[in-house]
Image (cartoon, rainbow, N blue to C red):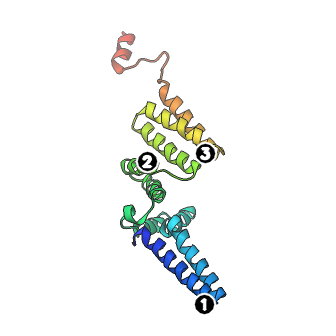
């Protein structure tokens, strides 16, 4: 995987050649070269492997998405800060099915790097809240859940947030057995 700055260097060189083409009178060539340089600028802003991983993830092809993400060997040099956030976000989604600890690490990194869309940040915090809840860190889970709800301005995750709140309420209510002995020993005592 190449360094992210190579794409900018290529775009600058193509633009310089486009200016040369304009000065020579080849207007059509210059316009085509400027359009070509816009592709490299777009790929600098939106990494091609992350875009392809998102497309695979939309089709529920986790293996295909993982293959595209694995092509990014060194995310620190190949990706911008927001792209590193999405790299960790996608890895967290894929790993969350099998390894909660690794998923938590990826989601925390995604939140630290930042995500450009509010609903993506809400999704990351919702996943972190679910992980914290399963690890019995209720206060952290409630805090993350309220942050996710505040970020979800379009109510895209409303149902998931409601379900999580209901599960947290159910878990906080102690199980009570009215009229039944609490252990076998107490049951024997009452029979005597």
Name which residue lies at 53% across and 80% down.
16
Q: Is residue 1 left or right of residue 62?
A: left
The residue that label 2 is drawn on is 112
Q: Is residue 185 left or right of residue 87?
A: left
The residue that label 3 is drawn on is 157
Residue 185 occupies quadrant: top left
Badge 1 vs badge 2, beta-carbon distance below 8 Å: no
Residue 46, visible in the rendered structure = no
Q: Is residue 159 left or right of residue 136?
A: right
Q: Earlier in the sequence, mark 3 or mark 1?
A: 1
Badge 2 vs badge 3, beta-carbon distance below 8 Å: no
Residue 26 occupies quadrant: bottom right
Q: Is residue 159 left or right of residue 135?
A: right
Tell me the distance, in whole angstroms, between the alpha carbons under discs 1 and 2.
Answer: 49 Å
> Residue 103 in the image: x percent, y percent?
41, 50
The residue that label 1 is drawn on is 24
């Amino acid at each position: 995987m190449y360094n992210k700055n190579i794409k900018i260097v290529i775009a600058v060189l193509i633009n310089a050649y486009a200016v040369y083409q304009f000065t020579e009178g080849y207007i059509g060539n210059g316009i085509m070269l400027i359009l070509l340089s816009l592709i490299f600028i777009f790929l600098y802003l939106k990494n091609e492997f992350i875009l392809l991983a998102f497309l695979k993830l939309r089709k529920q092809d986790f293996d295909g998405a993982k293959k595209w993400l694995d092509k990014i060997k060194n995310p620190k040099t190949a990706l911008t800060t927001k792209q590193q956030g999405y790299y960790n976000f996608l890895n967290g989604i894929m790993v969350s099915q099998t390894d909660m600890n690794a998923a938590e690490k990826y989601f925390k990194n995604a939140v630290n790097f930042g995500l450009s869309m509010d609903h993506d940040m809400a999704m990351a915090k919702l996943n972190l809240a679910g992980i914290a809840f399963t690890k019995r860190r209720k206060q952290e889970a409630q805090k993350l859940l309220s942050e996710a709800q505040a970020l979800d301005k379009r109510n895209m995750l409303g149902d998931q947030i409601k379900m999580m709140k209901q599960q947290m309420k159910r878990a906080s209510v102690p199980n009570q057995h009215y009229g039944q002995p609490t252990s076998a020993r107490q049951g024997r005592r009452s029979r005597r």
